[in-house]
Image (tube, rainbow, N blue to C red):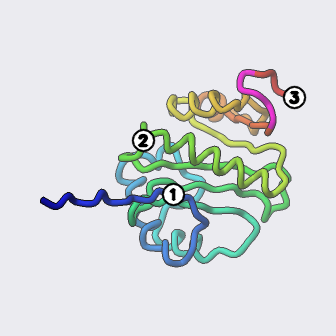
Amino acid sequence: MTSAKPSILALEFRSLVPELSAALGDFFECLGTTGTAAFFHPHPLTRELAKDLCHYTGRDLYFAGTYESRIVAYGLLRGWDENYVVPSLGIAIAPEARGTGLARSFMLFLHSAARLRGCKQVRLTVFRKNVNAVALYQSLGYFLGVGPRNARDAVLVEHFAFTFGQKAGAAPP
């Protein structure tokens, strides 16, 4: 009797490269068809932009979390191209990968990428209705920060900041 060898499935966080263009386009399309784009729209979620991002050579950072041959997470740290000191962080997780701990792991990866760039802080904006994301960010030590405020923002979004080295629940600097 022969036993089947267990398959080894790799989860990998990596910079976007041209070979990921089609998979990133599929991921962006999935975000649009599942309603995720209502909460995550740092840029157009098109196949054309997916290709552009996979060929990008600027200072901002764009990453994918891949599992098997699929992209299950997408993240960015941007603002350096516009000479900001504190980058904006964005993250989206494929619907089938939510609730697995992937978002927390990917956030920690993005934090490491920012720290390797010498950052002491990152910022993000999240819709208040995205309660799972708000809870994740708060559990990681994000605090309500100062961001652009207008009537729409006061109702819809929160602006959070994270300072490296600060413990979760500690008062912001």
Instruction: For label 3, count other residues whose C-alpha is less than 10 Å away and answer few (under 14), some (14-19) or many (20+).
Output: few
Q: Which residues are magenta?
A: 165-169
Instruction: For label 2, count other residues whose C-alpha is less than 10 Å away and answer few (under 14), some (14-19) or many (20+).
Output: some
Of labels 2 and 1, earlier in sequence is 1
In this view of the protein, which residue sits in the foreground, 122 or 97? 97
* Quarter of image, res 142: top right
Q: CA distance from mark 3 to mark 2?
A: 32 Å
Amino acid beneath label 1? Gly
Name the residue tied to disc 3: 173
Q: CA distance from mark 2 to mark 1?
A: 13 Å
Name the residue tied to disc 1: 65
- Determine whether label 1 and label 3 are within 8 Å by CB: no
Image quarter where the C terminus lies is top right
Identified at 52% across, 69% down, the residue is 50
Left or right of residue 35: residue 75: right
Q: How many badges with numbers are in the image?
A: 3
Q: Is residue 125 visible?
A: yes
Amino acid beneath label 2? Arg
Rendered location of residue 19, percent (x, y): 49, 77
In this view of the protein, which residue sits in the foreground, 15 or 77? 15
Name the residue tied to disc 2: 98
Rendered location of residue 95, percent (x, y): 38, 46
Rendered location of residue 160, percent (x, y): 71, 35
